[in-house]
Amino acid sequence: MTTPANPQRPRRAAHFSTPAQGQQSPRPSSDEAARRAAGAQAAPRAAVRPASSGSALTTNRMSAAATRATRRAGSHNVRREQTKRRGGAGLVVGGILAVVIVALAVVFVVIPSLNQGSSDTQQIETGQVVTVTVADGAGAKDVAQALFDAKAIANKSEFLTQVSRMNAESSIQSGTYSITVGGDLSSLIELLTTGPNAGGISLTIPEGYTLARIAQAVQETLGISSDEFLAQAKASNYVADYPFLEGAGNDSLEGFLFPKTYSFNEGATADGVIKTMLTQFQTELASVDLSYAEGRGLSVAQIVNLASIVEKESTPSTQAAVAAVFWNRLENMGDPNYGLLQSDATTAYSVGHDPTAAEVHDESDPYSTYVNKGLPPTPICCPGIDAIKAVCAPDSEYLDNGYYYFYFYNDADGNVQYVFSQTYEEHQRAIADAQG
């Protein structure tokens, strides 16, 4: 295959060579006990008083009756007092139980609830100005996280609820925003749907740019020397903060500087620019399901490597199919390709131009995928997110039905057309038909 004139798209044709190898009642008080004892002694003295006359007898009888009445009254009073005290004790116990229940509710309900929301809420400094970049294709949750990380909002859930009320998710625009912290959420969302408001210098990196071409664009736009940029662009300088760089070939950041439009202030440094691009890559990668590729043994660095070839060898509508072809070739160690990707684009990256037949078969070139099995030493460009997704979700029809070849050419209107084949003979006929 050949390298596209446009750094993102194929130029003319892609070729594959021929096959290779509980509680108690309260006790009465001491005063009460004394009164009860006194009453018990007074009654017998009245009862044994001599009956010297009728009046005296009547008096004695009355006194005895009075004594009995007093006893009964005293007994009732004691019972009422005991009941009253029991009631008071019950109120005390009930109060204690209520306090305990409230305390348990705080411990087991309120506090956990507060803790559960703690990761969603934070303190913010009203009036502070922060800069937030919304990535291309970012959903509302991604935007909420970016705003939260920049301390532009205090609560992610409140932001998302307001976005939903305003039906604004699909209207949020990517770019860099200057945000004054503490304003109402409606105004913030209106800003995000209006578009970027941050000043600065705009730097656009298209899909398919190589590291060298990015360095050139940085020099032309930001005035940072391309040599300085390339000298700083080493994976070892950033792998501690960006673990996905583990295993990057040749200590190179080729493939990892995410293509998009950025805004930088005057005085930007090579290190600052590189970190911004790597952070963007990290954000974009979080949206991709890597399970298919990782399940087949590829690291993130290798996924990016394969995606870079797909980026160079496909159009937006054919990326998943092209990825399927290269997956078939990558995993097949027998006929027809014997583990060879046979991509002209890998050699083009090495030699810097459309390669000749001799150059794609040059055994001394580690980027020749006609003579070296598997992936090249590094990615051959910085792929867009769609190419990475294609590698992680290749077209099942082309994958399962054993497509090993594709051919692309420009039709009479200048549009790129693709023909996919299962066998080498079909591939040759597709070439002949396109050229005839």
Image (tube, helix red, strand yellow):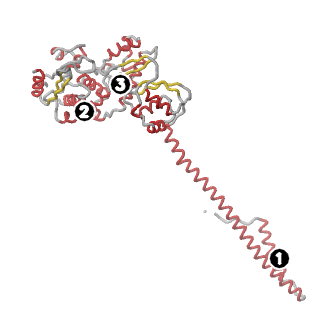
As drawn, the residue found furthest toward the right would be 53
Q: Nearer the viewer, residue 420 or 187?
A: 187
Residue at left offset 29%, top offset 21%: 208
- Give the distance between the C-alpha atoms of the residues marked 3 and 1, in whole angstroms: 104 Å
Locate residue 392, reporting x and y percent: 28, 32
Q: Secondary structure at mark 1?
A: helix
**Residue extending furthest front?**
413
Q: Amino acid at mark 3?
A: Leu
Q: Which residue is mark 1?
A: 42
Q: Position of residue 226 (x, y in %)?
A: 36, 11
Q: Disc 2 marks which amino acid? A: Pro
In the rendered image, is residue 344 in sight? yes
Q: Quadrant of the C terminus?
A: top left
Q: Which residue is mark 2?
A: 394
Question: SS class of the residue under badge 3?
Answer: helix
Whether residue 50 is situated above or below residue 300 in the rendered picture: below
The one nearer the camera, 88 or 224, is 224
- Which residue is identified by label 3? 245
Q: Quadrant of the N terminus?
A: top left
Near mark 2 (Cα within 10 A), the count class, few <14, some 14-19 or many ≥20, is many
Q: Amino acid at mark 1?
A: Ala
